[in-house]
Amino acid sequence: MYRYDEFDKSFVAARVAQFRDQVARRLSGELDEEQFRPLRLMNGVYLQLHAYMLRIAIPYGTLSSRQLRKLAFIARRYDKGYGHFTTRQNIQFNWPALKDCPDILNELAEVEMHAIQTSGNCIRNVTADQFAGACADEIEDPRPYAEILRQWSSLHPEYSFLPRKFKIAVNGAAKDRAAIRVHDIGYQIVKNARGEVGFAVYVGGGLGRTPFVGHKIRDFLPKADLLAYTNAILRIYNLEGRRDNKFKARIKILVHEKGADVIAAEVEAEFANHRDDALALPRQEIDRIRAYFAPPALAARATPSIAFEKRKANDFVFARFAAQNVVAHKTPGYGIVTVSLKPIGGIPGDASAESMEAIANLAETFSQDEIRVAHEQNLVLPHVALDDLPEVFDRLAGQGLATANTGLVTDIISCPGLDYCGLATARSIPVAQRISERFGNGVRAREIGELKINISGCINACGHHHVGHIGILGLEKSGSEAYQITLGGSADETCNVGAITGRSFSSDEIVDAIETVVDTYLKFRAGAAEDFLAAYRRIGMEPFKEALYGRQ
Amino acid sequence: MVKVISANRLADGIVVYAGRDGAWAERLSQAKIFASKAEAEAGLLVAQNDAKRNLVVEPVVVEVTGDASGLRAVTLREAIRARGPTIDFLPRPHAFAQDAGASQENTAKQTTNAVLRIPRLDTREREFVSATDSPDEIAR
């Protein structure tokens, strides 16, 4: 993992001291709300319906046990004993007092964490594949490049007041687990014909009220040019992005209005003109950062693992967990374990302080002290020996953390919705809970197979509803909650924005409507091997429309 | 339809209502009731003064209905502000500890709905704050 150097340390400490002074001046009345709001937002402090909310950055979703324990401590000491992991690999606390926020940031600084770049019209926290550095299908670990982008972009003076926020994701495997094509810039690590590793560049993706899939504007960008090219994109956006209308200010609108080809040409020209030495990444600097992310020295294990195979053969529940929540590690004899934060009927992405501590302890003992946050709002133990998996499973089960539903119908992404959020137009969490209870995690869920349901409580789409296989958008209609369904969305390398089925459903109707959609899939699928998305792509919208609304 | 005035307390962000005694109270039941629009507007001026005095943030007029059982916010948003999240959000250790167990093998429950139901709103009355009005950009 990346470790702070003296610069990082003093930079974050100075920032905490600065914010402490700003909070004191706000509380004393020296600053009014209008003056203070942008300052608190630059430190991740929002005001929601019931209280302040503090969003803490978890760069590229990587945490150490010590950091996760600190988050548990903050949850218990300064909040109500839990936190909410978000779709951008961050964590939010829902109840901190403003007067405590400087102390919380000070606690975070002790473990090399902060809340910088979690709000405002700047380059936000850079995200990456949650299996980075561990998965078998990886070309290269994306995190060193995410870290380089973080170091370059933090408080970048030219890019601290962009037309709107700007999100970058980096993915290192052929399978896109970082949803790069719904980011302002998505970097996909690729290998060219000469065997060199670099990036394919996608620009202009995004969700929100106007969803777009990012356009590829370059097939191969050498590693050395990562910052120079990012800089060129940001320059064009900063210059041409709209500042007259907040809802048209993201780069996706610029790319859409001018055309990806035009933007690509402008970026290339800017890049060619300013591909100066100042931003060229020296090989030794890349190597220096990569060294922080060197794969852990995993002890060789016998394969197949006897302990693992034996338990699998004798314990159906364990076998299910292994099949659903564990994927292959690049080192034989190891697995990557997803710890579901989606218990049946639970709140997606929420973790209690006790759960965080339990997972931190497991990571320390069994996963090289590392935890990852997935954008699907789960946690991951990235380096678990299969020999240890029975014990890890038992300990997770003892904490209620062994729900074997990764990628299934109950692994629902949900924003906080109207239960917390000042922007929301409808509740999301209760809908997620009811769907989860309806389908459960038994035979029926397994029969349905891989199915991603994403729920947002307003058009800002924090719950990524556009790219759910089934998306649910909560709206307000004549004073009541109403839910619109989209089908066929996807956030992976086959990225697609879902299509709206038709009229919305009331809160009372929505779970039945989702069940109708699922039943229609089961009726029409070519076989158990054809998952929901594949079936939808084959049969199209009509059968679902007919099932939901009858013959038109 | 009567009105009350609500805000968030500056120091901790907690929802508060302008109270009958001139102080800010945490319960809707303790809120001062304004019978007319003119009265509410006068009350809001006083509240805005409290905002200037750094006691509260963003005071607004909130429509409520009242009967013998007490005051009730008209919009869902304000009902949630008044009563807190409609979900059982506080962690209960081991609440789901059976997840790995055989009980999950049961087929799904068909009708369970643990959600606190808020009565359907009066559709004629809306006091709705749209995304465009919100000063904080919460979306991730």
Image: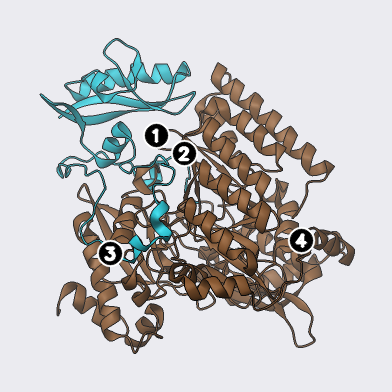
**A159 lies left or right of A204:** right
Nearest the viewer among A504 and A409 is A409
Residue B20 occupies which quadrant of the picture?
Answer: top left
Q: Cα distance, mark 1 to mark 2?
A: 8 Å
Chain coloured cyan in the rendered structure: B
Residue at the disc numbered 3: B108
Do the CB atoms of the residues marked 3 and 1 lie less than 8 Å apart? no
Pinpoint residue A421: horizontal percent, then vertical percent. Answer: 40, 43
Tell me which chain the residue with mark 3 is part of.
B
Tell me which chain the residue with mark 4 is part of.
A
Residue at the disc numbered 1: A50
SS assignment at label 3: loop
At x 58% / y 31%, what residue is drawn? Answer: A101
Name the front one of labels 4 and 1: 4
Are the numbered discs 4 and 1 placed on the same chain, yes or no? yes
- Of all residues, the one furthest to the right in this rendering is A284
Do the CB atoms of the residues marked 4 and 1 lie less than 8 Å apart? no
Are the numbered discs 1 and 2 placed on the same chain, yes or no? yes
Residue at the disc numbered 2: A94
Q: Mark 3 belongs to which amino acid?
A: Ala
Quarter containing the N terminus of chain A: bottom right
Q: Cα distance, mark 3 to mark 1?
A: 33 Å
Q: Cα distance, mark 2 to mark 3?
A: 31 Å
Q: Mark 2 belongs to which amino acid?
A: Asn
Chain coloured brown in the rendered structure: A
SS assignment at label 2: loop
Q: Cα distance, mark 4 to mark 3?
A: 43 Å
